[in-house]
Image: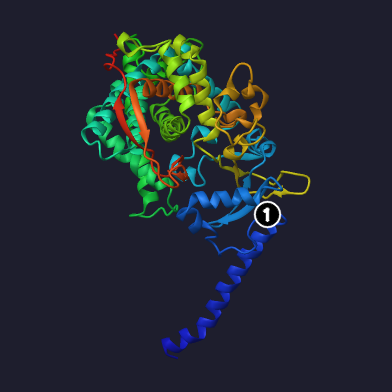
């Protein structure tokens, strides 16, 4: 028998086997879906992954629309059954049940491959509580005051640069997305590990972080030449760099120097804990190795970087759209801070800028940066009386949809809802899920809000800006957090008499 004859005999069996696999895959999807809203037929094995990668906004809008009645909807992506959660109460049910027999927070559908098995977000119970307790000193009022000073100096540096770029080429408006992203990367680097990164290391850091960002949006093909593999390797290099920064910080804190960045505050507390444990003849604290702390620093960077970029872009876009809000911000800020004072905005002034604080919170409600928070069902979980989430399902509670539930006229951008007399932040607290909820609620939310308030205050005070509007410029796109479709294109000019001279002295 010739090889051609043998293959001709095999072909029908191979085709039948493939059809059988397709059939089994489809039946498995329908069994898990049951009566949940969602597509009845999906492409075998890849499901709707192509439409997700090609147009994430349209894909998630469709999931939201499908879930409008039941509060959730189903779909299928690369061999994984997924469930989209629209209803706020159901989202809280997911957030409050992060434990070994319910849900695992993953941060990204294929996050373990990118972030590693021992990431903070994958921890449960006492181990998770202990690590959060050790992280807490990084966000005390004393630490936050140090960070706000650093943030202002970096914000000023970049605002001056943007205004110069715009003034030198007045016929070509600026797209702020990449400029804001670069500013945020410098802010994160400086606040987290500032003095321990050389300029060369900062440039390498920027390149690797760009590789990581691109990989987040691509199919999880972990092979040479693919964006996902490049992202995974970039994370390894970034973690190594941050590990070395941790080592240098420990040496500095052992010499009793004053903390100047987040890792210094962390190392100072770690040294105290280690010393106390040694005195009590107990083992060293868990998760205290340089590599582990370097990995957690990357977690902070990831959490702070793209989320803040999203918020700052939407702040500019919304302030341009609502000139009455912009006017009130400028009036309030001028009553507390003047560029001519050459002084930093202190934490007390920051707290007293009530209206600007309200604007920042409304930006976060109206356009929550991370619209979805992926979890994996560790076991079958009864979501409602009529539907049980199958084990292995990737569950997406929608922070975005919750933001438009409960609040008074939620589709309006209305900072006054967070005023002391309306207090919608308390009345509808359960719907404000920008920083998550439950045991994994964001530990750095005050840091993030401070950065947003400072940026709004300084941007509005120091610069005049005009958005260059086009059709669809405010449409939402995923990068991977959400941003305006046009990248927020503006023309800038200096508004103040002169720029302030800011320093830590």
User: 82 and 292: which one is in front?
Assistant: 82
Is 447 placed left or right of 76 in the picture? left
Q: For the view shown, which residue lies furthest in the left direction?
A: 168
**Quadrant that contains the C terminus:** top left
The vertical placement of 357 against 292, above or below, is above
Query: What is the quadrant of residue 464 in the picture?
Result: top left
Residue 381's x, y, as percent?
70, 44
The crowding category of the residue bearing disc 1, from other C-alpha atoms within 10 Å (few below 14, some 14 to 19, many at least 20), is many
Does residue 368 appear in this view?
A: yes
In this image, 397 relative to 151: left or right?
Answer: right
Q: Quadrant of the N terminus?
A: bottom left
Q: Is residue 357 above or below residue 342?
A: below
Identified at 21% across, 33% down, the residue is: 168
**Residue 124: percent from the left, percent from the top?**
59, 32
57 or 390, nearer to the observer: 57
The structure's colour scheme is rainbow
Q: From the top left corner, tell me how far across and down residue 21 is, in percent.
A: 58, 69
- Write down the residue under mark 1: 37
Q: Quadrant of residue 33?
A: bottom right
Picture quadrant of residue 341: top left
In the image, what residue occupies the spot 53% across and 20% down?
133
Q: Identify which residue, 360 or 492, lies in the foreground.
A: 492
Question: Residue at coordinates 65% horizontally, 22% vertically from top-left?
Answer: 426
Name the foreground residue: 450 vs 219. Answer: 450
The x, y position of residue 454, in whole percent, is 41, 20
Q: Looking at the picture, does residue 174 appear above or below residue 62? A: above
Q: Describe the element under mark 1 as helix, strand or loop.
A: loop
């Amino acid at each position: 028998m010739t090889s051609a004859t043998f293959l001709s005999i095999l072909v029908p069996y191979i085709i039948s086997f493939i059809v059988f696999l397709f059939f089994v895959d489809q039946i498995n999807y329908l069994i898990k879906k049951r009566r949940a809203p969602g597509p009845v037929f999906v492409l075998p094995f890849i499901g709707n992954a192509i439409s997700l990668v090609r147009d994430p906004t349209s894909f998630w809008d469709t999931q939201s629309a499908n879930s409008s009645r039941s509060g959730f909807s189903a779909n299928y992506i690369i061999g994984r059954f997924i469930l989209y959660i629209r209803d706020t109460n159901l989202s809280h049910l997911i957030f409050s049940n992060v434990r070994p027999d319910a849900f695992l927070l993953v941060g990204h559908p294929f996050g373990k491959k990118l972030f590693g098995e021992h990431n903070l977000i994958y921890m449960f119970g006492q181990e998770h509580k202990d690590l959060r307790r050790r992280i807490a000193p990084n966000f005390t009022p004393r630490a936050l005051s140090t960070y706000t000073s650093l943030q202002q100096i970096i914000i000023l540096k970049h605002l001056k640069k943007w205004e110069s770029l715009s003034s030198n080429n007045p016929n070509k408006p600026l797209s702020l997305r990449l400029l804001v992203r670069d500013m945020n990367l410098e802010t994160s680097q400086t606040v987290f590990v500032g003095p321990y990164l050389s300029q060369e290391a900062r440039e390498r850091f920027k390149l690797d972080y760009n590789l990581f960002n691109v990989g987040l949006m691509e199919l999880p093909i972990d092979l040479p030449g693919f964006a996902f593999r490049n992202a995974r390797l970039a994370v390894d290099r970034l973690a190594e760099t941050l590990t070395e920064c941790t080592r240098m910080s420990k040496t500095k804190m052992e010499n009793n120097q004053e903390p100047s960045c987040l890792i210094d505050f962390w190392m100072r507390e770690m040294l105290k804990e280690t010393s106390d444990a040694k005195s009590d003849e107990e083992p060293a604290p868990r998760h205290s190795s340089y590599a582990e702390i370097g990995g957690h620093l990357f977690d902070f960077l990831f959490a702070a970087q793209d989320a803040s970029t999203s918020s700052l872009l939407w702040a500019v876009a919304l302030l341009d759209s609502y000139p009455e809000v912009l006017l009130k911000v400028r009036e309030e800020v001028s009553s507390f801070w003047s560029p001519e004072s050459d002084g930093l905005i202190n934490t007390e002034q920051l707290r007293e800028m009530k209206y600007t604080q309200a604007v920042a919170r409304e930006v976060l409600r109206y356009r929550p940066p991370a619209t979805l928070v992926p979890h994996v069902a560790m076991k079958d979980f009864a979501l409602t009386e009529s539907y049980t989430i199958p084990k292995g399902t990737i569950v997406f509670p929608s922070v975005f949809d919750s933001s438009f539930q409960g609040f008074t006229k939620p589709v309006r951008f209305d900072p006054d809802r967070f005023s002391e007399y309306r207090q919608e932040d308390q009345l509808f607290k359960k719907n404000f899920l920008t920083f998550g909820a439950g045991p994994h609620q964001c530990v750095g939310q005050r840091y993030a809000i401070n950065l947003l308030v400072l940026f709004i205050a300084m941007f509005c005070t120091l610069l005049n800006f005009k958005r260059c509007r086009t059709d669809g410029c405010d449409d939402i796109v995923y990068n991977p957090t959400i941003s305006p479709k046009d990248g927020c294109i503006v023309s800038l000019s200096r508004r103040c008499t002169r720029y302030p001279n800011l320093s830590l002295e």
